[in-house]
Amino acid sequence: MKYSMFIGRWQPWHDGHRWLIDQRLNQNKNILICVREVSKNDSNPYNPQDVKANVEKELKDLIDAKRVRVIIIPDIESVNYGRGVGYDIIEHVPPSDIGEISATKIRKKLFSQ
């Protein structure tokens, strides 16, 4: 089974993230969400295991249907490929209302309460 892979911190999961994976789900593609194993700090207040659990909770129906998998990967510095590797690199440009969603602003709201 092939997957469309998305790599991120997902700190926290939000509607912009959902919009992004929906671009491929709506094309009947399966999704692999890779949670980067980053150190906790102000920009990354959740550890990778908590992020994975949160994403799995948000996407439980899709995981149960075997449309989505969530894994933790080591932190990365780049994504590299050679020619003719058998997969595409696809950029999804969100509409402005989705592009304006900011995990930084969400974290500030969450932690200022």
Image (tube, rainbow, N blue to C red):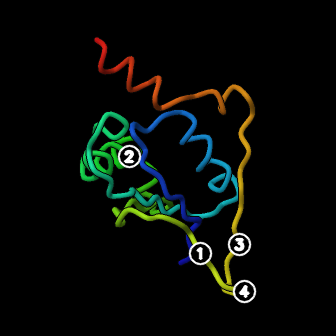
Q: Mark 4 or mark 3: name the one nearer the start of the chain.
A: 4
**In this view, 2 is above or below 100:** below
SS under mark 4: loop
**In this view, 34 is above or below 81:** above
Mark on residue 88?
Answer: 3
Say which of 85 and 69 sits in front. 85
SS under mark 1: loop
Residue type at mark 1 is Asn
Q: Are marks 3 and 1 in contact (CB under 8 Å)?
A: no
Q: Mark 3 or mark 1: name the one nearer the start of the chain.
A: 1
Residue type at mark 4 is Arg
Outermost residue toward the bottom in this view: 84
As measured in the structure, the alpha-carbon distance from the residue carrying label 3 to the one carrying label 1 is 12 Å
Q: Mark 2 or mark 4: name the one nearer the start of the chain.
A: 2
Which is in the foreground here, disc 2 or disc 3? 3
Q: Where does the image place residue 69, in percent across and percent down from the top left?
A: 42, 62
**In this view, 96 is above or below 7:** above
| Residue ID for mark 2 | 55
Residue type at mark 2 is Val
| Residue ID for mark 1 | 80
Side of 96 where 39 appears, left or right: left
Side of 48 where 58 appears, left or right: right
Q: Residues within 10 Å of mark 2 (few under 14, many from 20)?
A: many
Q: Are marks 4 and 3 in contact (CB under 8 Å)?
A: no
Q: Where does the image place residue 5, in percent across and percent down from the top left?
A: 55, 64
As measured in the structure, the alpha-carbon distance from the residue carrying label 1 to the one carrying label 2 is 26 Å
